Image: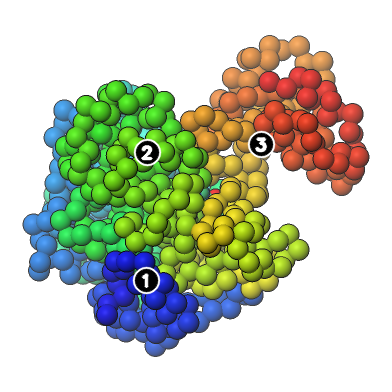
Amino acid sequence: MSNYHIKHLEEYYQVYRKSVREPHNFWEEIAEEHFLWRKKWDTVLSWDFSKPEITWFEGAELNITENCLDRHLATRSDKTALLFEPNNPDEPAQHITYKQLYHQVNKMANVLKSKGVRKGDRVCVYLPMIPELAVAVLACARIGAIHSVVFAGFSSTALATRINDANCSLVITSDGAYRGAKTIDLKGIVDDALNSCPDVKTVLVVKRIHSKITMKPNRDCWLQPLLDAAPNEAKAEVMKAEDPLFILYTSGSTGKPKGMVHTTAGYMVYTAYTFKNVFQYKENDVYWCTADIGWITGHSYIIYGPLCNGATSVMFEGVPSYPDFGRFWDIIQKHKINQFYTAPTAIRALAKNGTELIDTYNLSSLKVLGSVGEPINEEAWHWYNDNVGKRKSPIIDSWWQTETGGIMISPLPYVTPTKPTYATLPFIGIQPCIMDEHGTELQNNQVEGRLCIKFPWPSMARTIWNDHKRYKDTYFSTYKNMYFTGDGALRDEVGYYRITGRVDDVIIVSGHNLGTAPIEDAINEHPAVSESAIVGFPHEIKGHALYGYVTLKEKGESRDHNNLRNEINQIITEHIGPIAKLDKIQFTPSLPKTRSGKIMRRILRKIAEKDTSNLGDISTLLNPECVQDIIKEAL
Ligand code: PRX
């Protein structure tokens, strides 16, 4: 029996048991049978969570692009690999076949090499959702350069921080981006960022919106002429299993973003295997994940997972509301999408627009609906199920993280019975557990606590770039010998998991992970601001929105508060990006603090949630009197 494709529930349990009892044999078989290796491994797995040190397939050699591209040329060369749907519905879609993608990637690889990029160098990719983004990522992997994709919604300051942290020598960007009816000056943002990035020697610029931009001599080059002149074959660099494949930044509880490092072999095996099963992908299916490649979902489930399986993966440049809220349904109808993977925030925004539009489209091609990025609330789940899936397509509520590389807890469609708001069962090989706050594992069902993972899986991040100590402190120090996810979860009476949300200082706004510390750092730069504290509060569409409590230096500050609010949001936009703007800003003379000087966010969170009936014990506060004032003035 091949364990690669699980088709029914008994098989799931059987394979799951094997993956837990004999993880080495299990993963060895999967790796052996379904991937292309230059050299096989000596050791399947070695691990020590106390260090933490984890290696998978040590001794093996491979190139992930040979798995994503070369090996399909014999049987799928004319099959569409990437199906590009532009922002403007009147612009024709592009069907890029495996053969064409192979040549484009090789050309781009040759361009990178001609610009001096070598194995192990870091390349920053700051592009909109256009085919060149996927091509750039794969071209880096082809030559062994480490890609660091930065989501094109981040500001110049955020971009510069990421470029400098990874010491990138080259940036790939475009003259601009289309986003619905708007255009965004990406090149201008890059120019700003590079004022503080002395190590960047080269900027390659894709022409997308034909805007007027400045090209800095000896640094900036238009990409197309270089591609035109480049040979269309490039030798794939032979990579070791544990060579880094990419860095991807995620927010943390402290100011600096964490550059999560993913390595080659384990990441490839796990993303490919999860893709096949979580989406039950069949050879002629057309699969669409609406995420941006700037996030992990795009890395694992637009590029690597689908292409490793020879799938057709759709890339959409635009937004769900342009030219109207029927755009997603239009794309599903037009390309006969079979698997559709999106985020709860998008579902809620679409639901708010009713069902009139959706009913005018033919969505009968759909077989699987996915959700990712934050807990999906019951109402959104039912709306998705009733109106998009017409109660015929199972909803795959998939829980995972940038750090986990691939999907960790999820139903398998047509295999696992679904339950609204539950991510249900662990994926093959994943050993989740629920811990109480004293560090004891809650063994039974019907328990709630903090979600940890007990055993390594192939696609887990191996470190934080340049900061292994932070990796250890953040993920492996809260509970001994466990990976701590930062999420709360419960397990119901049949063993299904439901993720209840973050238990740390990360807030998920419209599916984007935002750390409170970097936002507070940005606000505190405003000359009038003394201190600030950010908490999340429930929001109809975004899931959570941000509420800022701000104290001013001059207590009787007479400046117009609305102006100050605008200025604060402007600073946040400059430092991080518009996604981190605050929905509410309350000015307050002081913030509640513990005797050791720590801001008591728990209380602020309750006030923001308008749940002030039970604030818990506030007697330990240094300044309990401020709490009533804050409640009185709450927005
Ligand atoms: O809190 C969990 C939430 O998103 C966090 C990870 O965010 P990020 O690293 O940006 O990756 C998002 C895409 C994989 C998690 O710690 N999260 C993600 N998926 C779910 C979820 N919460 C509940 N249900 C989910 N399906």
| x and y, in percent, of residue 372 in the image | 43, 48
Give the SS element for disc 1: helix
Screen quadrant of the C terminus = top right
Name of the residue lying farthest toward the front: 493
Neighbourhood count class around disc 3 (C-alpha, 10 Å): few under 14, some 14–19, many 20 upward: many
Q: Which residue is mark 2?
A: 384
Q: Quadrant of residue 115?
A: bottom left
Q: Amino acid at mark 1?
A: Glu
The answer, for residue 289, to whether it is visible in the render is: no
Report the front residue among 299 and 123: 299
Q: How many marks?
A: 3
| x and y, in percent, of residue 612 in the image | 76, 30
Task: State the mark number for residue 109.
Answer: none
Circle nearer the viewer, 2 or 1 = 1
Q: Which residue is mark 3?
A: 535
Q: Which residue is mark 1?
A: 10
- In this picture, residue 496 sits left or right of residue 593: left
Which label's residue is closer to the chain start, 1 or 3? 1
In the picture shown, does residue 305 fall above or below 333? Answer: below
The structure residue drawn at horizontal position 49% and vertical position 40%, both measured from the top left corner, is 378
Give the SS element for disc 3: strand
